[in-house]
Every structure is written in structure tokens, then in C-alpha cells.
Image (cartoon, rainbow, N blue to C red):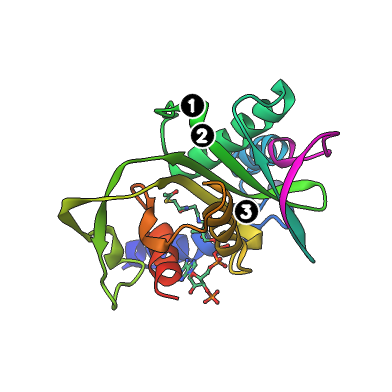
Amino acid sequence: KGGKAQFVIDAGQKHFGTTICKSCGMIYTASNPEDEVQHLQYHHRFLEGIKYVGWKRERVVAEFWDGKIVLVLPQDPSYAIKKVEDVQDLVDMELGFHHVVPKCPNKTKTFLFIDEKRVVGCLIAEPIKQAFRVLSEPNATKESSRAWQCSDVPEPAICGISRIWVFRLKRRKRIARRLVDTVRNCFMFGCFLNTNEIAFSDPTPDGKLFATKYCNT
Ligand code: ACO
Ligand code: ZN
């Protein structure tokens, strides 16, 4: 009997004191010293990683009332490449991806969504020749969407989106949508890509919910 009561108390404590940091977005237990140390380390690294001081020659490809999109190409100055690598490391850490070396690094296009002095969104695109269409699941939920269905027949495609990420505290403000619109407009000179000419590689549940919504509207 005593054991059960103890269990209930422990389970309650797990959620007690959970905090979300308003600057880095990490969820942690402020009352737990280990968690606090982890948070401080992450906090510093994250804010350094997304810090964007502005570049003398930046390629602004879209502007909005709440930010702008900057395109970085592989031949750009090393400070721009370094920023892209730092942001990609943060994104990969969050997604639990091991650092994957892009297949065509000299053809990769990275789009950064900048607000104030931070990178709050990132999209990495590369040319592809074919993709396997995801068969749409209209009733997909976040839980079920891990097991999506893919066609066996490759279809021609032009642009592969290998990463799309938006800062946790800036989600659901159409930043991802604006990044993809911009890629469709800028990926190939002089044409606006159709949604069936772009493909999301190995999407996460969030990525799939977004992609399904994006491609149907
Ligand atoms: N759940 C349900 N619907 C969603 C979600 C979600 N988590 N995210 C987006 N949508 C749908 C909504 O319909 C939304 O419109 P609404 O807000 O008016 O309802 C529409 O997509 C447009 O969403 P945006 O606001 O443009 O998307 P956001 O800027 O929030 O970014 C993203 C979406 C990039 C998936 C973000 O949630 C994220 O960074 N997640 C963590 C990283 C991740 O998993 N990235 C995808 C990896 S897969 C890949 O990189 C190929
Ligand atoms: Zn923090």
C-alpha cells in the first residue's frame, strides 16, 4: 500500500516544476540540478548557434513583416557556411540525426529564416532526380504518422528537402510554409516548382503533418 502511494507521489513530481525556457525553448525541471546544468549548456550553445549578426553581402530572397529569408550557397564566404553548419548541427541534435554528409554539397541550397538577430527557421534543399510519393493518409495523427505508406514507383522530382526546421517557440506561424514557398520560387531559375516536383526526405511526424498540409493547399 505504501509502495503505491510512493509511486503516485513520484509520478506527480516528474511533472512538478517543469519549465520551458522562454529564450531557448528547452523543457526541463528547474528543481533538478542535473537538468539545470544540462539546460545551461544547451541554452548557451543554442543561442550562440542561432545568433545572426547580419552579413555585409547577404542574399535576401524574401522579406516579410516579421522576418526575411536569406539563401546561402556552397561557394559563399566561410562565415556564412559556418553559420549554416552550426544551425544544421542544432537541427540534427534535435532530430536525433547523425551528421549526414550531403550527397551533393556543391549543389546544396540553404534557406535561413531570420527574425531580429536570430535564425529561427532553416531549410536545406538539394537537387534530386526522383522520389517516392507518400500515399496520403487523411486521418494521420501525430502518433500514427510514423507508419506512412510510400509508393514503390519512383517519380521524377527536382528538389529534395533534406531538412526543414523551425525554432520551437516560433512554430505554427507559417515560417515553414514560407520557407517552402521560397524554395519553390528560387530553386530553379525562372520557374515556380509544382508541389509534385519537391520531395521531403524521411520526414518526422511533425514534418509529415506539415508536408501533407502544405501539399494539399
Ligand atoms: N501538427 C499538425 N499540423 C501541423 C504541424 C504539427 N506539428 N506543423 C505544421 N502543421 C500544419 C498546420 O496545418 C499548419 O497550418 P496552421 O498552423 O494554420 O494549422 C501548416 O502545416 C503550416 O505550418 P507552419 O506554421 O508553416 O509550420 P512550422 O513553421 O510550425 O514548422 C515544422 C513545421 C518545420 C515541421 C516544425 O514543426 C519543426 O521544426 N519541427 C521539428 C523539426 C522537424 O521535425 N522537422 C521536419 C523534419 S523532416 C525533414 O526535414 C525532411
Ligand atoms: Zn534556455
Q: Amino acid at mark 3?
A: Phe
- Dot 2 crowding, Cα within 10 Å, few <14, some 14–19, many 20+: many
Describe the element under mark 3 as helix, strand or loop. loop
Quarter containing the C terminus: bottom left
Q: Which residues are magenta?
A: 47-62
Report whether residue 8 is seen. no
Q: Quadrant of residue 80?
A: top right
Label 2 with label 3: CB-CB less than 8 Å = no
Between disc 2 and disc 3, the foreground one is 2
**Label 2 – label 1 distance at C-alpha:** 5 Å
* Camera-nearest residue between 80 and 172: 80
x and y percentages locating residue 76 in the rendered image:
68, 26
Label 2 with label 1: CB-CB less than 8 Å = yes
Q: Earlier in the sequence, mark 3 or mark 1?
A: 1
* Camera-nearest residue between 119 and 5: 119
The residue that label 2 is drawn on is 108
* Camera-nearest residue between 21 and 61: 61
The residue at label 3 has a CB less than 8 Å from ligand 1: yes
Please give the label number shown on residue 71. Answer: none
- Dot 1 crowding, Cα within 10 Å, few <14, some 14–19, many 20+: few
Residue located 56% across and 51% down the image:
190
Q: Amino acid at mark 1?
A: Pro
**Label 2 – label 3 distance at C-alpha:** 21 Å
The residue that label 1 is drawn on is 105
Residue located 48% across and 26% down the image:
105
Q: Magenta stretch: residue 56 in it? A: yes
Q: Amino acid at mark 2?
A: Thr
Q: Magenta stretch: residue 140 in it? A: no
